[in-house]
Image (cartoon, rainbow, N blue to C red):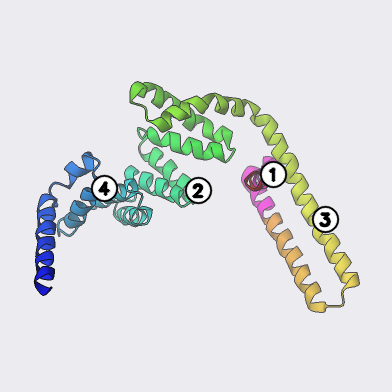
């Protein structure tokens, strides 16, 4: 039995030795180009152990993990690359795409926009960013990115991926949404006013009712604090919006509140 185990161990060592000789720090790029990302990861990890390695290797390692669907190690390697190369467009592209996989939309949007600011030739990011803004009903912001994506996809012709072809099919719907935006903005403003005013009136009515009917002093104080904190948050956002945008900030404040309410309703129902 021991002899069989030793033979198996020896056979495994021969296999892994052959695998490591086949893939090394000098040929990982061949596997990356061939989209054999598992072997590319193996070679890249070996290359990074070299004392004279270049931090760009973290970018390749991040994208290799990303393409394998392993988003946590992908994110870790993109963050390492960001430490050394904070103004590299590929680093921001990798971070943006990976954050979207974790539904961290604000972080994803920030890094995708930064990637395009650094490298406007990163055309494929327009599609990702445009769809992100479009799905958040931010149609006016999505317009320039999706227009760039449309031109990019049309230029590819037969080389377009299935995702890009599907985007082209939905572009007509997108153009309709842009035309409907003024109506949608009025709807968002209306619902924003309704939600803010109704919530404040509801909390006040609850407080007045409990204040007169409840003898529980602690409960009344807690409810009062909840009301004041809520009003403070609302007023804080209102003041910030007014300071940033002037009188137009009033419209923007209620519009954003309405958009948030409508997104929640759409997700629930």
Let me know if residue 132 appears in the view: yes
Q: Position of residue 199 (x, y in %)?
A: 77, 54
Residue 137 relative to residue 4: left or right = right
* Residue drawn at the location 37% of the way across and 30% of the way down: 161
Check if mark 4's residue and mark 1's residue have beta carbons within 8 Å.
Answer: no
Question: CB of mark 1 within 8 Å of CB of mark 3?
Answer: no
Residue under label 4, please give it.
60
The relative height of residue 7 versus residue 97 in the rendered view (above or below) is below
Q: Nearer the viewer, residue 50 or 17?
A: 17
| Mark 1 neighbour class, 10 Å CA radius: few under 14, some 14 to 19, many 20 or more | many
Q: Earlier in the sequence, mark 4 or mark 1?
A: 4
Q: Quadrant of the N terminus?
A: bottom left
Q: CA distance from mark 1 to mark 2?
A: 19 Å
Secondary structure at badge 1 equals helix
Residue placed farthest to the front in the image? 1
CA–CA distance in space, label 4 to label 1: 42 Å
- Which residue is at a point 21% across and 48% down the rendered structure image? 40
Tag 4 secondary structure: helix
Q: Which residues are magenta?
A: 237-262
The structure residue drawn at horizontal position 21% and vertical position 49%, both measured from the top left corner, is 39
Residue 148 visible in the picture: no
Q: Nearer the viewer, residue 162 or 248?
A: 162
């Amino acid at each position: 039995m021991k002899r069989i185990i030793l033979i198996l161990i020896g056979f495994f060592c021969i296999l892994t030795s052959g695998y490591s000789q086949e893939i090394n720090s000098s040929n990982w790029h061949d596997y990356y180009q061939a989209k054999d990302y598992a072997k590319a990861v193996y070679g890249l990890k070996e290359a990074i152990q070299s004392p004279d390695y270049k931090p760009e290797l973290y970018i390749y390692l991040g994208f290799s993990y990303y393409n394998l669907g392993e988003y946590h190690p992908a994110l870790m390697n993109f963050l390492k690359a960001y430490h050394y190369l904070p103004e590299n467009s590929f680093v921001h592209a990798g971070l943006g795409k990976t954050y979207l996989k974790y539904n961290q939309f604000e972080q994803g949007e920030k890094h995708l926009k930064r990637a395009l600011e650094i490298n406007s030739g990163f055309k494929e990011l327009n599609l990702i960013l445009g769809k992100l803004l479009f799905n958040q009903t931010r149609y006016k912001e999505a317009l320039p990115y999706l227009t760039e994506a449309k031109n990019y996809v049309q230029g590819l012709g037969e080389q377009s991926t299935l995702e890009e072809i599907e985007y082209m099919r939905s572009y007509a719907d997108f153009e309709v949404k842009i035309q409907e935006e003024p109506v949608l903005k009025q709807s968002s403003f209306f619902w924003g006013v309704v939600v803010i005013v109704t919530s404040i009136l509801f909390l006040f009515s609850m407080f007045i009712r409990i204040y007169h009917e409840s003898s529980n002093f602690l409960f009344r104080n807690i409810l009062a604090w909840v009301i004041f904190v809520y009003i403070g948050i609302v007023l804080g956002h209102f003041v910030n919006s007014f300071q940033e945008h002037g009188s137009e900030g009033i419209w923007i404040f209620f519009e954003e509140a309405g958009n948030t309410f409508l997104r929640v309703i759409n997700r629930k129902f």
